[in-house]
Amino acid sequence: MRTVRSLPRPRPSIEARSTVTRWIPASRHGFNVSVTSPKAPERASAIVFPMPYDYRIDRLALDRMEILAARTNRTVVGVESPGITLDEADPVSASASSVRADVLLAQIGGDYRPAASLQLSAIDDVLGGLPTELHLVGESLGAQFSAAIAGLIPCRSLTLVEPTNCVDRGWRGLLRQGKLLRTIEESRRDQYVAVNAQRGWPPTLPFEKSGSHAAAVDRRLKRFRHQGKYALASALGMRKSLASSLERVDAGLDVVRVWRGIDSTVCLAADVAVLSARMAPRLRVEETVMVLDGLPAGHHFLTEMDAMMLFADTLAGDIRHPPETVASS
């Protein structure tokens, strides 16, 4: 296990630009794909970053991906969960995309591969082909999608941040986690956004908290008959642990890196230990613990921009070196 501590630092110049494409094929499985490119990216190498739970690609997500692109010198591709999307240019008319019943049923059963396959198709279309060298980063529920993608195509690295399902959970455990995410961890997320503004970062808010109109749009979209049913399917699938997806990853990948906040209420040291034991000897789980300066390092610690900088810099080093040469402490 290694421990990293995020400290306030002067805000750097971030030289990266984002474009967002709304992917709407004939099947109507529409959602957004963002492409964030640094000034001179490594060719044929990209980081894929699926969105966590019911979050969508908004300005706050793009700010984080621009840091990731600039610090790793790689194109970063963000992709929303099928069925959970937002057209910020016209949010009022946004509605749930049509997602096949078999995709939803598979997700409820803990198999995210059909949904991940849609994400890969969207990335392939938007980029005009999949990158030769693929690095996967998944935060929260995005960890499950990243693990599922790694089970569909070869990847060079897999980094999971605050996965909420390192272990199998019963209904009671799932409900408890949902409550912690909505209360303690959401409050911490708000705190990180406030700290960003205090430290000179753009005071970027999540879309749903950017004003009363946006909040009303968000509430409408999250109703069950709109996008709520897709978020629920994703949540129910988390009863099964990540191991069910990691067992299917390409044989060329022998290590998965798991990051957790030291104060997280939903990704615990004991959970990571259980996942590590379950995956051995097929996959080695390398754990990194994030500590924030003067703040609780909770589930959304990557929302705090100094922590995002440290994560991006550490990831850049991990990508450059084979797993067996990465030092731990």
Image (spheres, rainbow, N blue to C red):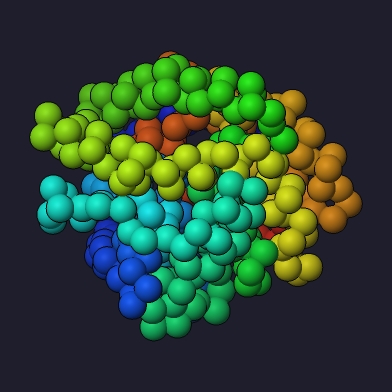
- Image side of residue 131 versus residue 202, left or right: right
Near-viewer residue (202 or 128): 128
Residue 228 position within the rendered picture, expressed as x and y whole percent measured from the top left: 38, 41
Residue at 42%, 23% (x, y): give it. Answer: 182
- Image side of residue 296 versus residue 217, left or right: right
Q: Residue furthest bottom?
A: 128
Near-viewer residue (89 or 101): 101
- Image side of residue 105 versus residue 56, left or right: right
Residue at 61%, 40% (x, y): give it. Answer: 238
Residue at 42%, 44% (x, y): give it. Answer: 229
Screen quadrant of the C terminus: top right
Residue 299 appears in view = yes
Residue at 37%, 73% (x, y): give it. Answer: 27
Residue 291 appears in view = no
Residue 265 position within the rendered picture, expressed as x and y whole percent measured from the top left: 57, 21
Screen quadrant of the N terminus: top right
- Image side of residue 313 versus residue 303, left or right: right
Residue 110 position within the rendered picture, expressed as x and y whole percent measured from the top left: 64, 48
Q: Residue furthest right?
A: 281
Residue 197 position within the rendered picture, expressed as x and y whole percent measured from the top left: 22, 29
Count of marks, rendered view:
0
